[in-house]
Image (cartoon, rainbow, N blue to C red):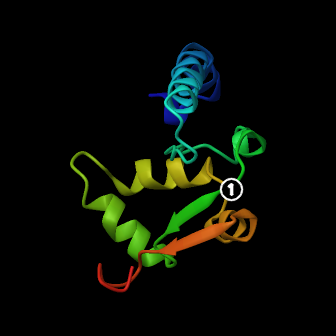
Amino acid sequence: IVLKDDAKMAALEAAIHPLVERAREEFKRAREDAGDVVAAFDIPLLFEKGYESAFDAICVVSAGSEDIQRARVLARPGMTEEKFKAIVARQTPDAEKRARATYVVETGCSMEDT
Protein backbone atom coordinates (compact mmCIF):
# COMPACT_ATOMS: atom_id res chain seq x y z
CA ILE A 1 0.00 0.00 0.00
CA VAL A 2 2.67 2.51 1.01
CA LEU A 3 4.88 1.75 -1.99
CA LYS A 4 2.17 3.19 -4.25
CA ASP A 5 1.33 6.25 -2.14
CA ASP A 6 3.97 8.82 -1.15
CA ALA A 7 1.73 10.39 1.51
CA LYS A 8 1.11 7.03 3.17
CA MET A 9 4.82 6.20 3.01
CA ALA A 10 5.64 9.55 4.64
CA ALA A 11 3.09 8.92 7.40
CA LEU A 12 4.46 5.43 8.04
CA GLU A 13 8.03 6.71 8.15
CA ALA A 14 7.04 9.58 10.47
CA ALA A 15 5.58 7.04 12.89
CA ILE A 16 8.31 4.42 12.69
CA HIS A 17 11.59 6.27 12.16
CA PRO A 18 11.60 8.09 15.54
CA LEU A 19 11.09 4.74 17.30
CA VAL A 20 13.89 3.12 15.30
CA GLU A 21 16.20 6.08 15.93
CA ARG A 22 15.51 5.91 19.66
CA ALA A 23 16.26 2.17 19.72
CA ARG A 24 19.45 2.75 17.73
CA GLU A 25 20.62 5.43 20.19
CA GLU A 26 19.81 3.19 23.18
CA PHE A 27 21.79 0.36 21.59
CA LYS A 28 24.70 2.70 20.87
CA ARG A 29 24.74 3.99 24.48
CA ALA A 30 24.60 0.45 25.84
CA ARG A 31 27.54 -0.59 23.67
CA GLU A 32 29.54 2.47 24.76
CA ASP A 33 28.69 1.82 28.42
CA ALA A 34 29.87 -1.77 27.99
CA GLY A 35 33.20 -0.50 26.68
CA ASP A 36 32.70 -1.73 23.13
CA VAL A 37 34.72 0.20 20.57
CA VAL A 38 32.92 -1.19 17.51
CA ALA A 39 29.21 -1.69 16.87
CA ALA A 40 27.45 -2.59 13.62
CA PHE A 41 24.06 -1.30 12.51
CA ASP A 42 21.92 -2.56 9.62
CA ILE A 43 20.22 0.57 8.26
CA PRO A 44 18.42 0.05 4.93
CA LEU A 45 17.77 3.77 4.31
CA LEU A 46 21.07 5.09 5.63
CA PHE A 47 21.87 7.39 2.71
CA GLU A 48 18.27 8.16 1.77
CA LYS A 49 17.54 9.56 5.23
CA GLY A 50 20.92 11.23 5.74
CA TYR A 51 22.01 9.08 8.69
CA GLU A 52 25.56 8.48 7.42
CA SER A 53 26.98 11.46 9.33
CA ALA A 54 26.20 9.67 12.62
CA PHE A 55 28.80 6.97 11.90
CA ASP A 56 32.58 6.81 11.73
CA ALA A 57 32.58 4.34 8.84
CA ILE A 58 30.04 2.91 6.41
CA CYS A 59 30.13 -0.67 5.13
CA VAL A 60 27.90 -1.34 2.13
CA VAL A 61 27.00 -4.94 1.32
CA SER A 62 26.34 -5.23 -2.40
CA ALA A 63 25.51 -7.99 -4.85
CA GLY A 64 27.25 -5.80 -7.44
CA SER A 65 24.85 -6.78 -10.19
CA GLU A 66 21.26 -5.65 -10.61
CA ASP A 67 20.42 -9.09 -12.03
CA ILE A 68 21.73 -10.86 -8.92
CA GLN A 69 19.94 -8.40 -6.63
CA ARG A 70 16.67 -8.80 -8.56
CA ALA A 71 16.87 -12.61 -8.48
CA ARG A 72 17.55 -12.66 -4.74
CA VAL A 73 14.79 -10.21 -3.90
CA LEU A 74 12.23 -11.87 -6.15
CA ALA A 75 12.98 -15.21 -4.45
CA ARG A 76 11.54 -13.81 -1.19
CA PRO A 77 8.01 -14.91 -0.28
CA GLY A 78 5.36 -12.42 -1.45
CA MET A 79 7.76 -10.34 -3.54
CA THR A 80 6.72 -9.29 -7.02
CA GLU A 81 8.46 -7.44 -9.84
CA GLU A 82 6.17 -4.46 -9.17
CA LYS A 83 7.14 -4.32 -5.48
CA PHE A 84 10.80 -4.78 -6.34
CA LYS A 85 10.73 -1.86 -8.80
CA ALA A 86 8.92 0.36 -6.28
CA ILE A 87 11.47 -0.41 -3.56
CA VAL A 88 14.49 0.13 -5.84
CA ALA A 89 13.02 3.44 -7.06
CA ARG A 90 13.12 4.75 -3.45
CA GLN A 91 16.70 3.66 -2.84
CA THR A 92 20.01 5.33 -3.51
CA PRO A 93 21.51 3.57 -6.55
CA ASP A 94 23.95 0.81 -5.68
CA ALA A 95 26.84 2.50 -7.50
CA GLU A 96 26.35 5.65 -5.43
CA LYS A 97 26.17 3.69 -2.17
CA ARG A 98 29.38 1.90 -3.09
CA ALA A 99 31.09 5.21 -3.92
CA ARG A 100 30.02 6.75 -0.59
CA ALA A 101 31.01 3.74 1.51
CA THR A 102 34.17 3.38 3.54
CA TYR A 103 34.11 -0.38 2.89
CA VAL A 104 32.24 -2.52 0.37
CA VAL A 105 31.48 -6.20 0.91
CA GLU A 106 30.91 -7.92 -2.42
CA THR A 107 28.24 -10.63 -2.22
CA GLY A 108 27.71 -11.32 -5.90
CA CYS A 109 30.07 -14.25 -5.61
CA SER A 110 30.45 -17.38 -3.52
CA MET A 111 30.21 -17.26 0.26
CA GLU A 112 33.90 -18.19 0.41
CA ASP A 113 34.87 -15.27 -1.85
CA THR A 114 32.64 -12.89 0.09
How many numbered discs sit on the rendered protein? Answer: 1
Quadrant of residue 54 within the rendered picture? top right
Front-most of residues 83 and 112: 112
Quadrant, the C terminus: bottom left
Q: Position of residue 101 (x, y in %)?
A: 69, 64
Q: Amino acid at mark 1?
A: Ala
Whether residue 102 sits left or right of residue 13 in the image: it is right
Residue 10 figure quarter: top right
Residue at left offset 66%, top offset 69% = 98
Give the labeled residue for mark 1. Answer: 57
Q: Secondary structure at mark 1?
A: loop
Quarter that holds the N terminus: top left
The answer to whether residue 19 is above or below residue 79 is above
* 47 is higher (above) or lower (below) than 97: above
In percent of the image, x 33 and y 52: which residue is there? 80
Depth check, front residue: 59 or 48: 59
